[in-house]
Amino acid sequence: MLPYSRQSISDTDIEAVVDALRGDWLTQGPMVARYETSLAEACGAHGCVAVSSGTAALHLAYASLGLGPGDEVITTPITFSATANAACLQGATPVFADVEPDTGNLDLDSVASKITDRTVGIAAVHYGGLPVDLAGIADLARTRGLWVVEDACHALGASYDGAPIGDGRFSDATVLSTHAIKNITTGEGGAVLSRRADVLERCALLRSHGIDKRAGDPDAPWSYDMLALGWNYRITDLQCALGLSQLARLDAWIERRRELAGLYAHHLARRLGDAVRPQAGRAGRRNAHHLMSTRIDFDGLDRTRADVMRGLRSEGIATQVHYIPVPTLHYYRERFGDQPRAGADRFYRQQLSLPLFADMREDDVIHVVSALERQLVGDAHGS
C-alpha cells in the first residue's frame, strides 16, 4: 500500500536516538536546547521553544499572548481542529472566515469582515505548506490592534518573499508540528518560534507547569516557585535527538517534495486536464508541499469521492481528505452554531490529498495519476 504520507527514518536517525539513550539525560537535558537553537536557525527565528506537539505549541502561543474568555480569534475552517481547539481551551471563541477557492488559505476580505470589538487575534494557517497572504494579514492586524499567530504545522521549509516561514516578520508567534508525517519528525512534537522575548519566556514557563526554579529561595538549593498555572508540554531529549538528525536533511526533502509536486502537476494536466486541479501557487511564496492537495469536480464527473478513494485503495493507493470543515464538527455545531462558509464547503467537497512524501519515486507518481484516471474517467489512455 502506497500511503498518502510517511516518515523517513535513516540509520543516522536511529544512531542519534541510541546515543541519546546512552547519555545522562532522557528529558529536560542539553539536547532540547541544541534542537531549539538549530530549529530557530533553520527558520531565521529569534528564538524557539520546543514542546510535545503542535497542539501544545498552539495552546502555549495563544496563552502567551493573553487569549482568554470573551475573546475571539479569527481562523480558517479548512484546518485540523487543533487550530480552533487550542483557542477553546483558553475559553475563547474561534470565528471562521472563508478561504480562497484555489489555495484553501484564508481569504483576506473574509477575515476583515469577521473582525468585531471582541477580536484579539488572527490564527493564519499555511494550508498544505503554501504560505497565506502574510503581508496582507499583518497589515490588517496592525491597523486593528490584533496579534497574529502563524499555524505553520504544514509549512516548515516554506518561504514568503524570500525569507523562511518562522522568521517572525509578520507575526507574533509561529507554530510548528513535527508529527510523524510532517516534513521532519520527532515522532510527536511541536515548537513555538517568535521574535518577541516575552512570548518565548512565557511559553518556556508554561510548558513546564508554570514552575521557575530561578524564582526560588537562593538560600534553599531545592527551592522553586510556581509563577503561573501551566502544563506538562515538555519534549524529550530522545525526540530532540531525532529532530536534530532530521533537520540536516530538511532542505533536500523540501526540494524533493517540490520535484514530486511538479511531476504530479505535469502528469495530472496531461492526462486529466482541468478535471483535477492541484493547489494553486502564489508569486513570492514557496510551498513546502506537506500535502499533495487537489480539487476534483466529483459531481461533474459523476463520481463520488468515497468510490474514488475505495477504487484507489483497491489499486494499493491510500488517499486522505484535508479537512472536514471545523465548524461542521459536532462540538463546534453544538457550541457555536453554524457560520456561513460557502467557499470552504465547496473546497471540502472537491478536496483529495494524493500520496506525497520524500521517499516516493517518480514511478509512484505516474502510478497514482494513472490509477486516478481510471477511477475518474476510465482507462482511455492506458496505464
Image (cartoon, rainbow, N blue to C red):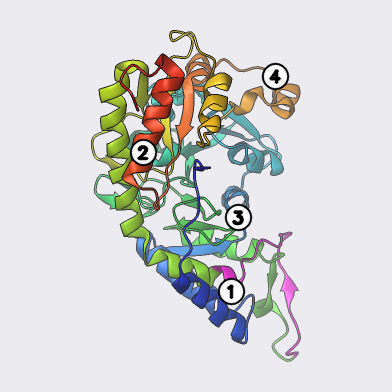
Task: Measure the alpha-carbon separation of dots 2 and 4.
Answer: 41 Å
Report whether 289 appears left or right of 187.
Answer: left
Any magenta on residue 119? Answer: no
Q: Is residue 51 visible?
A: yes
Indicate which disc residue 53 carries: 3
Q: Residue placed at 61% from the left, 66% from the top?
A: 235
Q: Are marks 2 and 1 in contact (CB under 8 Å)?
A: no
Give the residue displayed 44% in from the left and 70% down from the top.
Answer: 245
* Rendering coords of residue 352 (x, y %): 48, 28
Callout 3 environment at 10 Å: few (<14), some (14 to 19), or many (20+)? many
Q: Name the residue under label 4.
A: 337
Nearest to N terminus: mark 2 or mark 1: 1
The amino acid sitting under disc 4 is Gly
Looking at the image, is mark 4 or mark 3 earlier in the sequence? 3
Q: Earlier in the sequence, mark 1 or mark 3?
A: 3
The residue where tag 1 is placed is 237
| Residue 84 shown left or right of residue 297 in the figure | right
Give the labeled residue for mark 2: 365
In space, the residues marked 3 and 2 are separated at their CA atoms by 30 Å
Who's the residue at 44% across and 53% down the image? 183
Q: In this view, does 215 lie above or below 228?
A: below
Residue 140 location in percent, x, y?
A: 39, 32
Q: Give the range drawn in magenta.
A: 220-239
Amino acid on which disc 1 is placed: Asp
What's the distance in space between the residues labelled 1 and 4, CA to CA?
Answer: 43 Å
Q: Do the residues labelled 4 and 3 touch (CB within 8 Å)?
A: no
Task: Name which residue type carries label 3.
Answer: Ser
Q: Earlier in the sequence, mark 3 or mark 2?
A: 3
Mark 4 crowdedness (10 Å alpha carbons): few <14, some 14-19, many ≥20: few
